[in-house]
Image (cartoon, rainbow, N blue to C red):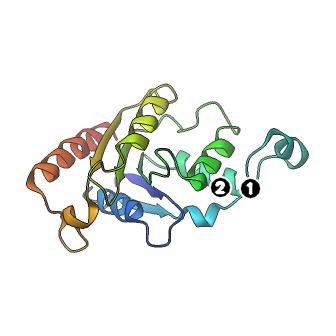
Amino acid sequence: MSKKIVAFGASSSKKSINKKLANYAANQIAGATINLLDLNDFEMPIYSIDKENENGIPQLAIDFKSHLKDSDGIIISFAEHNGAYSAAFKNIFDWISRIEKDVWANKPMFLLATSPGGRGGKSVLDIAVNKFKFMNQSTIVHFSLPSFGDNFSDEKGILNEELRTGFRKELGAFVEAI
């Protein structure tokens, strides 16, 4: 039976390099059914307890959470905005965390980050790994791809041999967990 993978770039950019990386990672899993989400399809009011008390949890948050629960594994590639999550991702994260305590449905996760710069989104990736390990008892692996424009090709994927080897190691651990 084919594994169901939900993948998304944690960015609202229409040309998100993180969405490209998440899609690439998901498509490296032989025989998997890929559900590539776009955060723009889940735009909601900025989370506040007042809005939740007045209007409840938006249907879009419930729908997003449903995609997570219906998967066998989750791949997220984080855009780094001022060293942290993008506002688009943080808002969805805030809303889905109100649905139930198990935010990530206890699914194996492959957390990625990339950026045009040499650190490859490591600051936001560190935040996510350190936060999510307390929110998910399943396997969480991670990989950072620096200098996206130099190290990634739409046709060939990860170009640098050392980075490709590191990516494949982490991907293997994720696949084993799903």
Quadrant in the rendering for residue 32: bottom left
* 42 relative position to 143: left or right: right
Q: Dot 1: few (<14), some (14–19), or many (≥20) neighbours within 10 Å?
A: few
Foreground residue among 61 and 118 = 118
Quadrant in the rendering for residue 169: top left
- The image shows residue 74 at horizontal and vertical percentages of 43, 47
Residue at (24% x, 42% y) in the render? 170
Count of numbered circles in the view: 2
Quadrant of the rendering where the C terminus is positioned: top left
- The image shows residue 69 at horizontal and vertical percentages of 55, 45
Residue at (43% x, 66% y) in the render? 16
Look at label 1 and name its amino acid: Gln
Which mark is on residue 27?
none
- The image shows residue 154 at horizontal and vertical percentages of 26, 72
The residue that label 2 is drawn on is 63
Foreground residue among 12 and 116 = 116
Residue farthest along the right direction in this orientation:
54
The residue that label 1 is drawn on is 59
Q: Is residue 170 above or below residue 116?
A: above
At mark 2, the secondary structure is helix
